Every structure is written in structure tokens, then in C-alpha cells.
Image: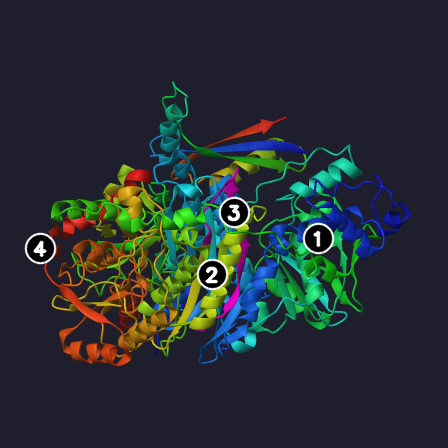
Amino acid sequence: MTLDTVKHAAGTPDVELPWRELGLKQDEYARVREILGRRPTGAELAMYSVMWSEHCSYKSSKVHLKQFGEKAPRTDALLVGIGENAGVVDVGEGYAVTFKVESHNHPSYVEPYQGAATGVGGIVRDIIAMGARPVAVVDPLRMGAADHPDTKRVLPGVVAGIGGYGNCLGLPNIGGELVFDACYQGNPLVNAGAIGVMRHEDIHLAKASGTGNKVILYGARTGGDGIGGASILASETFDATKPSKRPAVQVGDPFQEKLLIECTLEAFAEKLVVGIQDLGAAGLSCATSELASNGSGGMRVELDDVPLRDSTLSPEEILMSESQERMCAVVEPAKVERFLAICEKWDVIATVIGEVTDGNRLEIFWHGEMIVDVDPRTVAHEGPTYERPYARPSWQDALQADDAGRLARPAGSAELREQVVALLSSPNLASKAWVTDQYDRFVQGNTVLAQPEDAGMIRVNEETGLGVAIATDGNGRYAKLDPYTGAQLALAEAYRNVAASGAKPLAISDCLNFGSPEDPDVMWQFVEAVRGLADGCLTLGTPVTGGNVSLYNQTGDVAIHPTPVVAVLGVIDDVARRTPIAFKDEGHLLYLLGDTREEFGGSAWSQVVHDHLGGMPPAVDLDRERLLGEILISASRDGMIDAAHDLSDGGLIAAVTESCLRGGLGARLVVPDALSAFTFLFSESAGRAMVAVPRSEELRFTDMCGARGLPAARIGVVDGSSLEVQGEFSLSLEELRSLHESPIPSLLG
Amino acid sequence: MARVVVDVMLKPEILDPQGQAVQRALPRLGFAGISDVRQGKRFELEVDGPVDDAALARIREMAETFLANTVIEDFNVKVES
Amino acid sequence: MTARIGVVTFPGTLDDRDTQRAVRVAGAEAVPLWHRDKDVKQVDAVVLPGGFSYGDYLRAGAISRFSPVMETIIGQAKAGMPVLGICNGFQVLTEAHLLPGAMLRNNDLHFVCRDQRLRVETSGTAWTSDYTAGQQISIPLKNIDGRYTADEHTLDELEAEGRVVFRYLDGNPNGSLRDIAGITNAAGNVVGLMPHPEHAVESLIGTGRTDGLGFFTSVLKKLVDA
């Protein structure tokens, strides 16, 4: 077997390489040759092909994502923005919080448990790499139809995987969503978010600088996980005699990751780490090229020193391996011994595999020969940029003209009651306890709010009560009707949810789930959604700190609904003042804040009663969302409200039901004169929330709303043991509970 | 190098819900005629040196004190050629 | 003199910090103990906290029980030192044979996390003297291998000797025989239970109840009186 060294490649320019099989386009391969001034070695080809893939290089989305930076609102809270492993915001008292949402969609469809588990592992490593102790996880999930056999294959495995990994790491799961829609049948969305907390001075970045500093690979041994492409390279071109490798499904080892967390945090505490990167997609190829590219530019790596699980791996395979639970730290020579000792204490394998060099070449050696000699910037940060064509779909106008307002409405109280029952017992609005009870929400002892609250909330400082809140939202139906507005509605909803808990929104992370960028319809959806999100963030003053793009979520020609998921992070001065959704005391007055209009496009009602998706989504008024948020936060802080719940899917009826059940108390609602009972209960107008106000606070509260110009209508009172809509119908709490709690267990139990 | 296999099973009187879940799924998947399924663990031990009586005795002790929890599990030890 | 209560950390232990907090809230000094050290620093009592030590690989608690620190703890427990095993800690105690029986996978095969109501069956142990027999408390339960089992003879013995310390109320969450949630040894100094009292010592966090504090105050009283 001839090792394909740099020298050999320089001398054999006409050797054919399997660049197409590795996913490169002809012009991309030509560009690689141009950059190097020769043909690439097999190992270099492996690196370029994986780092220039859509997933790693964002080549189809980069030009549009730029807007997040260009339109970024000015804010003092942002400490680390887009471009690092995760964004970091200042939350006060010298604390910084890092957070991010990512996707692991396709792997979860193939192997639900491990796909979801390794998704959690990956996002948590991003958080550690920023210098933080991870403190919580959230999981937005979108599955196919609730009663479809394949959903029963995927969902339980995904939930078990998220729980199995997250619980073993000791991370409370404090939020997320579960949405069922046929459009996700062949492409379920498994997004994973994580939050970490640290002191400002603990922030670490992914860069290798300081000539002579050592590069240490630590964590699990490297095996053949996820090396599909590399094995093509190895078996076809350079060694036809080796047994063919099947790309191994990545299996997560949460225990290994827990050890990784502890030893990394100890190393941070002793100030041993100059730069750090986790190994995720593209493994060592990514870690080395990014560390070098972000740093001074030069690095030398001895691949022979990589601890292996499988000794038959070729160097190309080692470079492409996606074995989990591995990190790369850059450490000054004098501190290496101490770093290794800390790893040994935790029984974590750690090996020096290279060092930072002068100049700007990444040089990788195997058996003493150089097999990679590249400028790391060209690998990690100068990948191709596509300007994919996009155009408003030919069917968009017709879809928007198919007004949901024209759908048949319930004729009378009996039918209204029937439709309320159908809505509340639909899988999307039913209780998700079957899922969330499989997650530990108590570990670490700082969980103040967890699902089914509006936002998850974690206490950061035991003494002062400082805390942070997070909410994730992303209504794909709205985005299908109008991607620009839909993206803004996702942002507005998550923003509203954080404010409803009493926390002030600071920043966002986004997980953009779309179909194929090669389809101009989908690309248009993407462009519109990014534009909407960027514009929305500017208006609300919440910058995008980072995120993830997941493309190619489609089966054949049918793409998923465009689904931009937005995670909003907020801060609260004192978690003791947080406002949950549960009704607390009889006699509290119920107020509906905001304006209710006849807006049913994309609504839960239109889906459940009419299986309809059409018209325009609810209108967005970001200034109103901002005002609503400020009122909710002030009211929470000053004790004017005892419960608050945002209105979104399922409108007011869904929100009141959830608050009743959570508090074990009924409510009597009175339909305002200006609205029909139908609109009152089912409309999904944005910019609204419902609050429960103690009588003693009513005047203070309504005065505040009046002075600030926020419509606030008294709609009822917390009372009794039924949910009664005066003049229309009544549902006892037992009945509500049964409607709410039985659907998901009956489908999946 | 020789391989010794230690099979560990829950004692017969212990409820095995994992085995039951497998058994319930079989007819759904088109496999009839299975009246019971019990799920266990198999340890494959690569032994340095010969697998003589002393080695087997050591492995049995390993199984009894560590690989199996004899409060709830039985084990057996088998040499594979 | 403040009582000193050791809290052990095995690789993969998760609830050690919360347990240390609970010890402090109760008014004692929490002493972290590392699994590799045989020296237990002359603590007055030990808590084996919850978590997934060694990832629960092989069996929950099966590897931890052989740690150097456990050698010392087993000896001292037999000599009367109060030892509390919470969840994974309970699993370590049964694997170490300081308590009888064993833990199996929950019978519905799912991890379950919920506020769990329990009945205190006896206050005659080092860790439950601040409760009264028959008292009902609510503390978080969160595990996947929480089904307690033992043979009939052992179960009868536990009942006859008043060594069942807690029983599950409102439905058995995992199939534990005789609804047993926690037990003690003959001398009453070693107690193991599956639910997590350390997550119920502050009204702001978790369940919002402080029913778990009694474990830690009980042992303090015992140590003060000793």
C-alpha cells in the first residue's frame, strides 16, 4: 500500500480521486487543486470534502445568515456573538450564560435513540467548549402524524435517547416542545438546546495560538463512527485489499461525557487551557482546522498519537471519524503535565497529538510522512459560497388566498363545546407529560420552572436569586403560509414566553429546519425566514448569538414546512419573583392582554376541525410584543400578577385550560361584547397573554396597562372546579384533565 | 488467546419486563409461536494464556462477585474454542 | 461542634452537590469524599448520593461498590456509623450487601421523574427520627432502575422487624415489591431509599416542598445525642 503523502501527490498529478463520491462538485475539486497548487492527498481530500459539505460550511445559507450580523441590534449584553461554538450573554453579577440550539434530524430518523442521544451530547460539548458548566437542556421535537406507525417507531426512541443521555449527564430538561404534523413524517425534527453558566473571566474560545503550545486530544478513543465517506476513499483508491467498512452508527456514551465535563471544568478552574474545541461533525478535520484557522494559523499533528478503538483505521478514516465524547485542548507546555493529571483523576484518556507552529500551515503526519499540508483557513473558513436561486413559489398566492376565516364555524354552544373538546384532546395541545416525565428536571437543584411552564428557568446565584429563562418556539404552519411573518411569529412567541415567566429577553439562538436548498421554492422560504428573523431581532433588541441550519429535510419532492425554531434566553433578577402559569387562588381576576382579531390562518382550530392550512398567519406587531413583554415583566416583579400564560396555538381556550389544570382550579369566563365566543376562544392573534390578578392589585395593574397603552380586558375570574364560558358551555376539571392527559399515553403507551 | 463466555440471566422467578416487551412485539412483527422471552447479558472475555481449571475458577469467581448479582441473577461459564 | 457529614462522589455521581447543600441547610458541615480515597476524614455520617455512577454500566452501583472509599464505609457502617443511600446510593448499598435485596429496571421500562408521595413506616432509624410513623411526605422520584426486589423470606423479615422505612403511595411507580421505597438494616443506622430528599429542602426549587429536610436534621440530632 502506498501512503498518499504530500510528496507523492505532488509527483502524481494525474491520479484520479473519488471527489464526487465524497460529495464535492467538480468546480469545488478544481478549487482545491488551485488552492494547493497540486492534487490533494487522500487525507486532504477527506478534510476538504467533509468541511466543505453543506452541514459544515453552510455554503447555501452563509450569504443570507450574514444578515444576523449586519442587522444585529446594539446591546451591551452580548459577550460572544456568531462564529464561536455558542453565543455568550452577560446576565449580571459577573455571570455569563452561553446557550445554543442545534439539530440532529437525519440521524434520529435512522436510529432514534442514538441519534437523539448523540444530539444532546454534541450540543452539550459546544457549551463546555465555551468555558461553562452546562446547567440545563431543552428539546424541541417535531414528529409525523401522532397515530402513524412510524411515529411510534421514532418518538419513543428519541425521548428515551434524550432522557438516557441527558439524565445520565445530570442535566435537568426544562423545556422544549412536541409537535405532530404529517409534513415531518419522513423527516422528523430533533432539535437540542443547552445552557451553560460561567463567570465572565471563564469564557474560552476555539483558537490555537502561542507557538509551541501543545494540542491535546482527550475523551473517548477514536473508532469508525460516521466515516461513510472516508471508507470510500480508503477502500476504493488506496487499499482494495482491506475489508469494506460499514459506516458505524454513532453510539453515545453519556458517562464518558460526564467525565469530560468534570475534568474540563477542573482544567478551566486551574487556568490550564488556552483554546478548546469539541469534536463534532467532521471530527478531527474540523477541530484541527478550526483551532488553527481561528488562532495564529499554524499547527502540526501526529495522527499516530490518536488513541484508537479500532487499530485498522486508515489516516483518512481517523481524520473523518465522528466518534463521540472527544475534545481538543490547547495547553502551554509547562501546564501539560497538570492537565494530563486531571484527566487521569477522572479516568479520561488524554494524549498530546500536536502543537501550535509558526506560519499558517496545518501539517498532519502519519508514520513520519506528511499527508496533509494546507492553509487551515481554506478548509475551515473559506469554503464555497453558493447563491442558490430562489423564487416565490407558484402556489403561494393561492395558499394565502385560501382564507381560514371562510371555514365553517360552530353553529351554537353545543357545537362550540364539541370543537373545544376536539381541540383540547388533539395531540398537539394535549399534555406532554408522557414525554417530560422521562426527563430528570430536578438534578443540580436549581430548576425553578420546567415544562409545562411557558419557559424553563434556572437559578444561577443561590444568594441573590439571579436566574435565567429559556423558551423555544417555531410554528411551521405559520411559516408555510408566510415564511417572513412565520419566522417573526416564532421569535415573538419565544420572546413572549420568556417575558410571561418574568424574565427579560436578552438574545436568541436559532435552529433553521428547511427542505432542499436546491429547490427554489424552499430557498425562497429560507431567505424570507432569515430576513424576517433578522429584522425581528433588530426591532426587539435581541441579537442572534449563533445557531444551526438543517437543510435537505424532505422526502422526494415534498419538503417539510419551513420550520425556523427560535430559542430566546432571558434574565431575571430574583427567581423568587417568577410567574408560573398555574392559577393560584379563587377570586383572582382574569385579564386578556392585547388585541384579539379574527385570525385563524394556520391555527390549531383550522387543523383539528377542518384539516386546513391556508390564508395568512396572524399579523405580527413587534412593538406590541415589546410592550406586552415589559408589562408582564414589571407586573411579575412587582407582584401584581400571580399567573401569566402566553396565548399561541389553540388560542385562549388552550391557555386557560392549561392554567386551570396546572393549578387545580376552575375559571369562569365571560365573552367580551365585541367578540364572538368562537373568536374569543380560538383566535390565534399574536401579542397576547392571559394573567391572573389578585383583586388587591387590580387597580394598580389596570392603571399600568392603561398608562402604557396596552389593551387589557377583564374576561373572568378563577373560581370553582369547572371551566365555564358563560352562556356557552362548561367542562369540569376532571373532564378537562382526562381530555388533556389521556391522548399521548393512549397513542404511545 | 482464548475466549470464555459468561451468560447472565435474571433468576426465573424475577419479573422480566424487557423480555415481556420483546415477546409482546413478536406477533405484531409476524413471528408466531414464541411462548416466552427472557432477556439477559452475555460477556465475552478474551483470556491471556491457557483456560485451565485455575483460570476457570477465577472467572467463576469474577462472575459470582461482579458480573452477576447473585441476589437476582444466575450465570453460566462456557469456554469457546 | 458542628456535625460533619461525608458526601461521596463516584465517577458519574450527579446529586452530590445538592446533597451537600441539603446537609448545609440542615446545619451540618458537608465533607466531600472522593471514591479513590480510603480516608473518610473522620466524618460522623456518610451519604451516598444519587446519579449514574459509572453510567450504571454492568448494573447500577455494581462498580462503585468496589471503590476504595466503600471499603472504609462498609467497615464503619457495620460498626454503627449512620449511612444514607439515595437512589444510586441505595443501589450501591444493596450491591455492597449492607442492605438486602436488589434493584431492577422499572416495570414499565421508562425513566420516571415525578413528585412522589410516600408513607413513613418507621421513625426508628438514624435518618428518620424527625418524622413520625404514618406521616405522609412528598419528595421527587427520578430513576429507571428503581424496582426493589428481594425473596419472600427477606421481605417477610423486613416487615416483621419493622425495617421497611418508606412505602410508595398513590400507585407504585416502578413495581417495587410490597410498595417498598426505602429500607433499613437491623441496627437502623444504614438506610436506603429511591426518592431524593435532597431535592426537597427548599420551597423555591423542585417540588416546592421541604419534606426532605427531615432526613438531614434527624441524623444531626442522632449525632448530637451520641
Same chain under badges 1 and 3? The reply is yes
* Three-letter code, disc 1: Val
Q: Which mark is residue A306?
A: 1
What span is in magenta?
A541-563
Indicate the quadrant containing the N terminus of chain A: top left, top right, bottom left or bottom right: top right
Q: Which mark is residue A194?
A: 2
* Upstream in sequence: badge 2 or badge 1: 2
In the rendered view, does A160 fall on the left or right side of A326? left
Give the distance between the C-alpha atoms of the residues marked 3 and 4, in whole angstroms.
46 Å
Q: Position of residue C72 (x, y in %)?
A: 46, 59
Q: Chain of mark 3?
A: A
* Circles 4, 1 touching at the beta carbon (< 8 Å): no
- Residue in front for this viewpoint, C220 or A314: A314
Q: Disc 2 vs disc 1: which is toward the camera?
A: 2
Give the distance between the C-alpha atoms of the residues marked 4 and 2, in whole angstroms.
46 Å
Q: Disc 4 vs disc 1: which is toward the camera?
A: 4
Same chain under badges 4 and 1? The reply is yes
* Three-letter code, disc 4: Gly
* Circles 4, 2 touching at the beta carbon (< 8 Å): no
Disc 1 is placed on an element classified as: loop
